[in-house]
């Protein structure tokens, strides 16, 4: 099996972090990982958005997060476990991850919920 790519802390860029977190599913995954100090199996996030996310799509999201330097992935048998590299990134870019996660959480709390239109009402 091919080894996983994890950039060194010196190679992590703000642009790569912002790009990886520009996708709504990836930022939701990352905010959840940062909020807990344990490893997460990829399949834990298969229902994150209320819809089932295919395993192949989840793999691509985790690859983007890993290659941006946001998470560290470790194979355990057939499972992939992921943990945040927040403390490493915070040494390079103090406060960046905390600010992004806080802004995301605030956005979730203040986002107005639109009522769904029923098909019969159209």
Image (cartoon, rainbow, N blue to C red):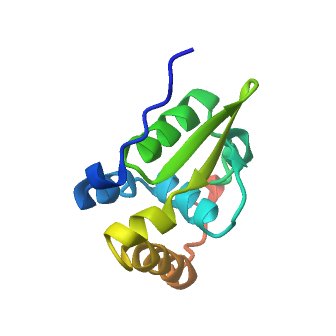
Q: Is residue 58 left or right of residue 93?
A: right
x and y percent of residue 113 in the render?
57, 76
Question: In the depicted view, which residue is nearer to us: 52 or 40?
Answer: 40
Q: Is residue 122 visible?
A: no
Give the position of the C terminus as an image quadrant. Answer: bottom right
x and y percent of residue 80 in the render?
67, 35
x and y percent of residue 34 in the render?
59, 66
Total tally of numbered discs in the picture: 0
Question: In the depicted view, which residue is nearer to us: 9 or 45?
Answer: 9
Q: Is residue 50 left or right of residue 99?
A: right
Looking at the image, residue 113 lies above or below residue 52: below
Q: Report the residue at 33% width, 67% height from top.
A: 92
Q: Residue 1's quadrant in the figure?
A: top right
Looking at the image, residue 80 lies above or below residue 70: above
Q: Report the residue at 64% width, 59% height from top.
A: 118
Looking at the image, residue 66 lies above or below residue 119: above
Q: Residue 56's quadrant in the figure?
A: top right
x and y percent of residue 61 in the render?
49, 41
Q: Report the residue at 26% width, 61% height from top.
A: 14
Q: Is residue 88 left or right of residue 80?
A: left
């Amino acid at each position: 099996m091919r080894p996983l790519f994890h950039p060194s802390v010196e190679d992590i860029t703000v642009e790569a972090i912002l790009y990886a977190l520009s996708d709504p599913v990836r930022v939701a995954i990352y905010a959840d990982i940062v909020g807990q100090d344990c490893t997460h199996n990829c399949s834990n996030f298969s229902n994150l958005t209320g819809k089932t996310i295919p395993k192949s799509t989840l793999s691509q999201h985790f690859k983007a997060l890993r290659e941006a330097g946001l998470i560290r992935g470790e194979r355990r048998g057939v499972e992939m476990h992921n943990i945040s590299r927040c403390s490493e990134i915070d040494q390079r870019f103090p406060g960046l991850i905390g600010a992004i996660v806080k802004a995301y959480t605030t956005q979730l709390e203040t986002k107005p919920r639109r009522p769904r239109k029923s098909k019969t009402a159209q």
